Image: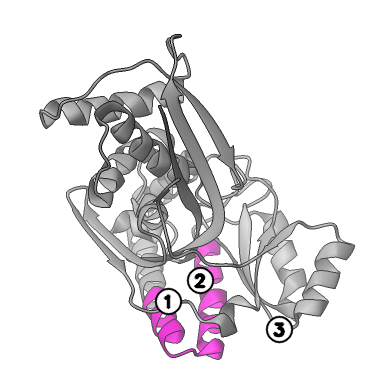
């Protein structure tokens, strides 16, 4: 018996870190995928991460009195998602592996709502205080407007609009360098800033909330100038949160002549800050700059399917 599931990467368009404090975030899934296969194996699995995920699934099955068979398992992972680049590799792993283990132990497919809820518990292991937006986007796919008030109160809205081709054909995902810090460490750093100066951080978070809402409307109305302005405003607020390194600021300053960019994801303050979402005024000039400076980049291609069984 072999059970395989695939889940996509994600890009945060707006709402980084503010989403942990009850503000909305706008996220889209993109066409980089992670696939996991679970199969029966005689040897007991020693991988700590997979044992943790399996344990969360089994605890759910026991709690809800769902019949299951606790087989020994092996696993294979194939991923197109760069690790540690703020593209949601852990969220894709959490979603796909939870779905695979649920079916592996019970012989049944489960609703995405259940899979997503358990994937969020896995994400806590990886990141400490995640918002839940990454795993929700990877699970449901498409353009997601997400808000978490409390652990037990989340609003997950798959927007009934598609990301415009007029936007995506000018968007790049540019690698500013792998962060030295983990997402958990960046979350803790922002938490410390918030504890030391809550009034200042609340102003930043409210500003990001307005930017997020404006970005939704710019996508709905196919308003490129508004979208680009939102990117630049969002970047300034992320710098206020100290999640953008000097190296990444310098890169964005160089890129400004070719368009508008912002860090996407948790960021990084010491070395690289992960990936940058960049709206290009001229694809040709942007590519020439990136290739001349040997900077890795990817095209921006959305994914609407979310979690799928292979």
Secondary structure mostly seen in magenta is: helix
SS of the residue at dot 2? helix
Asked if 259 appears above or below 115 in the picture, the reply is below
Whether residue 124 is visible:
no
Give the CA distance from mark 3 to mark 2. Answer: 18 Å
Q: Position of residue 175 (x, y in %)?
A: 69, 56
Image vertical order of residue 128 relative to residue 161, above or below: above
Question: How far apart are labels 1 and 3 at the CA level?
Answer: 21 Å
Q: Is residue 227 left or right of residue 122?
A: right
Quadrant of the rendered image containing residue 94: top left
At a point 27% along the width and 42% down the height, the residue shown is 109
Neighbor class of circle 1 (other Cα within 10 Å; few <14, some 14-19, many 20+) is many
Residue 258 x, y percent position in the rendering: 75, 79
Return the residue at label 2.
234
- The residue that label 1 is drawn on is 211
Q: Earlier in the sequence, mark 3 or mark 2?
A: 2
Q: Quickly name the residue at label 3.
A: 281
């Amino acid at each position: 018996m072999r059970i395989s599931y695939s889940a996509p990467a994600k890009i945060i368009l707006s709402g980084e870190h503010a989403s942990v404090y009850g503000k909305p975030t706008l996220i889209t899934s993109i066409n980089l995928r992670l696939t996991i296969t679970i199969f029966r194996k005689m040897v007991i699995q020693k991988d700590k991460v997979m044992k943790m995920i399996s344990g969360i699934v089994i605890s759910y099955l026991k709690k809800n009195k769902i019949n299951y068979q606790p087989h020994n398992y092996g696993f294979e992972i194939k991923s197109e998602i760069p690790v540690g680049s703020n593209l949601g590799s852990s969220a894709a792993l959490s979603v796909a592996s939870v779905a695979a283990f649920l079916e592996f132990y019970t012989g049944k497919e489960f609703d995405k709502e259940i899979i997503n809820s358990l994937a969020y518990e896995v994400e806590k292991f990886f990141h400490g205080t995640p918002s839940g937006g990454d795993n929700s986007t990877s699970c449901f796919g498409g353009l997601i407007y997400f808000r978490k008030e409390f652990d037990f109160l989340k609003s997950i809205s798959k927007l009934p609009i598609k990301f415009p081709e007029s936007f995506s054909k000018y968007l790049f995902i540019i690698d500013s360098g792998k962060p030295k810090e983990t997402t958990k460490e960046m979350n803790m750093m922002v938490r410390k800033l918030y504890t030391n100066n809550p009034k200042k951080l609340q102003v930043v978070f409210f500003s990001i909330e307005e930017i997020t809402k404006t970005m939704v409307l710019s996508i709905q109305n196919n308003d490129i100038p508004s979208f680009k302005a939102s990117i630049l405003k969002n970047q300034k607020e992320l710098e206020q949160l100290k999640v953008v390194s000097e190296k990444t600021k310098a890169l964005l300053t160089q890129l400004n002549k070719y368009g508008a960019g912002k860090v996407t994801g948790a960021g990084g303050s010491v070395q690289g800050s992960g990936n940058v979402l960049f709206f290009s005024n001229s694809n040709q000039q942007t590519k020439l700059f990136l290739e001349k400076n040997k900077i890795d980049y990817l095209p921006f291609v959305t994914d609407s399917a979310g979690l799928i069984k292979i």
